[in-house]
Amino acid sequence: MSAPAADAETFLAATDTLAALRPELSLLEAGILAGLHLGLAEDSRSFARIFGVEHALVLRAVEGLSAETLLTVTARDGRTQRTRYAASPAGSAVLTALAA
């Protein structure tokens, strides 16, 4: 089994776990949290590029996670709208379930 396949499986398993723990989250929102937890992407543009998702959809999901107080927006580029984010204390608590 190759490393990228294992990484994809780990990402999908983390996304599924988060979606089961927090059913109010969309799969994209759960994926953003999983990607943050796994160190795959810490900004909206990188997540969109890595996973082949429209940047506007990622921005909308980041705003939703921010409204749910699971993410904290740390920086935003006014021209490109690239948004950098980190797990909030509530988001970190949710992500601890992945470490178990």
Image: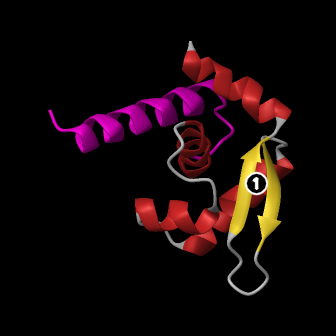
Q: Can you give x and y, in whole percent of width and height, for residue 90 in the image?
A: 82, 31
Return the residue at label 1: 64
Q: Which of the pair 55/43 is nearer the observer?
A: 43
Q: Where is residue 99 in the image (x, y as percent from the top left)?
A: 57, 18
Residue at 78% over, 40% down: 70
Give the magenta part as a residue range.
1-26
Q: In which quarter of the image is residue 10?
A: top left
Report the residue that reaches farthest toward the left.
1
Q: Is residue 90 above or below residue 83?
A: above
Residue 97 locus on image (x, y percent): 62, 19
Q: Does the magenta stretch include residue 10?
A: yes
Residue 95 vertical position relative to residue 43 in the rendered view, above or below: above
- Image coloring type: secondary structure
Q: What residue is at 56 percent from the left and 12 percent from the top?
A: 100
Q: Crowding near pointer 1: few (<14 within 10 Å), some, many (20+)?
A: some
**Quadrant of res 61:** bottom right
* Residue drawn at (27%, 44%) of the image: 4
- The amino acid type, in three-letter code, at marker 1 is Gly
Q: Position of residue 24 (x, y in %)?
A: 69, 38
Residue at image location 54% in from the left, 43% down from the top:
39
Side of 50 relative to 99 (left or right): left
* The quadrant where residue 1 appears: top left
Q: Nearer the viewer, residue 30 or 89?
A: 89
Is residue 9 shown left or right of residue 50?
left
Task: Using the image, determine if residue 56 lies above or below residue 78.
Answer: above
User: Number of callouts in the render?
Assistant: 1
Q: Which residue lies furthest to the bottom in this view?
A: 79
Q: What element does badge 1 sit on?
A: helix
Q: Is the magenta stretch mostly helix, strand or loop?
A: helix
